[in-house]
Image (cartoon, rainbow, N blue to C red):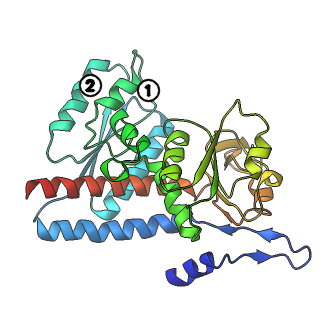
Amino acid sequence: MLCVSRLLLRLGYVSRHHEDQRLIATVVSGNKTARQVKQRLLVQVEQMQTQFSGFRPGLVVLQVGSRDDSNLYISSKLKAAAEIGINAKHIRLPSTTSQDEVLRTVLGLNEDPEVHGVIVQLPLDSERPMDQDLITNAVSPLKDVDGLSCVNAGRLSRGELSDCFLPCTPQGCMELIAQTGVSVVGKQAVVIGRSKIVGAPMHDLLLWNHATVTVCHSRTRDLPKQVSRAEILVVGMGRAEMVRGEWIKEGAVVIDCGINHVPDDSRPSGKRVVGDVHYASANQRAGFLTPVPGGVGPMTVAMLMQNTVISAQRFLQNQT
């Protein structure tokens, strides 16, 4: 089934309305791709356990405070880890914890040989002053499976892709682009957003995979014109449905990283989740389009698991 679906993607398979012959985008499912990644990782973890009896990759999620949204994200990470055999632990420090206490906890995890990946859950929910960058950079680059430390970010910016951990959301985006069968090489790519977590590393990944990349942001002039040039479009601006379908180049690959809540009286919660791309209109122009939810989100978690397994493999290689 996977081979057939990939063949259809590579052939540029799309469905069309018979009446108006408008293009309907092929949905690029993050849920499906994430399942494939986790199945591959499960096999790799089992192989490590066979070769090194009792060994399990170790992951720690460090949280300060108890934000509801952070709790939800952490729950999904712990669930994914359990599915593939990673020993994941959640350390929750109270919101009254000092910065020095957080740093001591991070340094202790850096020294723990049973921990191969450390995540500092952001944002920090603290009642006391916290330097988020200082704490993030305190994580050992060898265990920075979020790929957010300045060391790993610097290596990525220099094109040293095999010598760093890649940030999970951009890495997941690249996996989804690969699923379409569209080569990045030589393509005109546009990234909307320049955050340290998504936009900036997304630019670097596309660039070092040989795309020609334009980064747009809040001060970009004539955004629709810039978007219209994109053969590959990645949007991570954090503005609900800001990118309209009429902006999009016909047949483009569109990856939507946005997660926004908008009012919807038809839902029991009174709201619904949408991306940064107006899905209904983009669906009429794009060749490939990720849904929200069920697109980039699951891939971010899957790439976190992949980085943790890679870290554990490197650890074992250094022991032999």
Q: Nearer the viewer, residue 151 or 22?
A: 151
Q: Which residue lies under the disc numbered 1?
A: 125
In the picture, the disc for residue 103 is 2
- Residue located at (20% from left, 37% from top): 110
Tell me the element at label 2: helix
Front-most of residues 146 and 224: 224
Q: Is residue 276 left or right of residue 183?
A: right
Name the kind of residue labelled 2 in the image: Leu
Sequence-wise first label, 2 or 1: 2
Tell me where residue 143 appears, x and y as whole percent: 26, 43
Q: Tag 1: residue type?
A: Asp
Find residue 89 and report its horizontal and vertical position in percent.
27, 46
In this rendering, is residue 121 above or below 188? above
Callout 2 crowding tier (Cα within 10 Å): few <14, some 14–19, many ≥20 = some
Residues tagged 2 and 1 counted as in contact (Cβ below 8 A): no
Left or right: 253, with 93 as reference point? right
Task: Using a 10 Å C-alpha cutoff, classify the residue at mark 1 as few (fewer than 14 neighbours), some (14 to 19) or many (20 or more).
Answer: some
Residue at 46 percent across and 53 percent down: it is 171
Q: Residue at x 30, y 53 (%)?
A: 308
Q: Residue 307 at x, y = what percent?
A: 33, 53
Residue at left 66%, top 35%? Answer: 217
Q: CA distance from mark 2 to mark 1?
A: 15 Å
Look at the image and tell me in which quarter the C terminus lies.
bottom left
